[in-house]
Image (cartoon, helix red, strand yellow):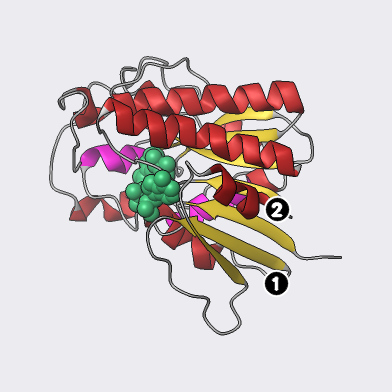
Amino acid sequence: MSDQRILITGAAGIVGTLMRPRLARPGRILRLLDIAPLEPAAPGEQVEIVPGSVTDAEVLTRACADADAVIHLGGVSREDGWERILEVNIDGTHTVLEAARAAGVPRVILASSNHAVGFRRIGEAGPAGLPADSSARPDTYYGVSKAAVEALGSLYHSRFGMDVSCLRIGSCFERPVDVRQLSIWLSPQDCARLLEACLSTAEPGFRVLWGVSANTRAVVSQSEGERIGYHSRDDAEIFADQVPPGELPGYLGGAFCDIPLGQHNPL
Ligand SMILES: NC(=O)c1ccc[n+]([C@@H]2O[C@H](COP(=O)([O-])OP(=O)(O)OC[C@H]3O[C@@H](n4cnc5c(N)ncnc54)[C@H](O)[C@@H]3O)[C@@H](O)[C@H]2O)c1
């Protein structure tokens, strides 16, 4: 059997860097794409580096050749001007999906965000938590782009039968840093578990899933992920005494609901 090849866009970013060692497996090649520099393959590491932009169709055509799956993380990961969000996140995702379709890649995982539904009230759906497929209530242009990413994924599933998972990631970092993140943290290990579940679903489908751990203070549903075999083993609560005291925001998107629209924001 030939090696499984997984293209990861935005591989030099926070999530990509956390996933690189965690998704490594015998018989699997990780093909890493980014506009930012990437560490060359370490001895024994099954990695291919593709420098370039998700907005470049030629780069994506090369990057998708012989790929079994795409994990699309690349793009603008916070609020920014409309033109940049449109070009990189929306046009860029279209370019990725189109190249994947043309190359016959059967499976794509798209990084969405809690900010696609940032203006949903925490607690609005009761104790079971906000369902993963709640309709879009974006809090920023960035959030709008993630809603568009999900819509593009839905289109490519319905038209071409591609298996598409959209992950509404909460906050995926080494550890949570504030009270809000105690509710929506996705541990790096759980992120890898979630991606493995998406990579091994049997039936081609389209699904929107929360990317969160089973946090004690959870505000979103776990059931959609569990249905495809994602079982979180982590809980942000172990970091609770290291987080400054504070209140949970009223809206899921937290501070993104108040930042100026369309301005580059370091948050
Ligand atoms: N980390 C989180 O908590 C979190 C939460 C919600 C959603 N997400 C989403 O997950 C994905 C990864 O997030 P992250 O935290 O690693 O973000 P990040 O900003 O650290 O990484 C994004 C990567 O994309 C690359 N990139 C930007 N423009 C590109 C282009 N035109 N072509 C190719 N690569 C490009 C950047 O160089 C960077 O390495 C993003 O799509 C983000 O919106 C992340």
**In the rendering, which numbered label is found on residue 26?**
1
**Most prominent secondary structure in the magenta stretch?**
helix
Q: Name the image quarter holding the N terminus.
A: bottom right
Give the residue at x 73% y 69%: 27
Q: Is residue 259 visible?
A: yes
Seen as rendered, the residue at the extreme bottom is 43
Identify the amino acid type marked 2.
Ala
Relative to 159, is 100 above or below? Answer: below
Q: For mark 2, what is the residue? A: 65
Q: Is mark 1 within 8 Å of ligand 1?
A: no
1 or 2: mark nearer the eye: 2
Residue at 19 percent of width and 36 percent of height: 264
Residue 135 belongs to magenta span? no
Q: Residue at x 42, y 16 (%)?
A: 125
Find the magenta span and give its range: 179-197
Q: Position of residue 225 (x, y in %)?
A: 59, 36
| Residue 159 image position (x, y, % from top left) | 73, 22
How many residues crowd around disc 2 within 10 Å: few (fewer than 14), some, or many (20 or more)? some
Q: Residues within 10 Å of mark 1 (few under 14, many from 20)?
A: few
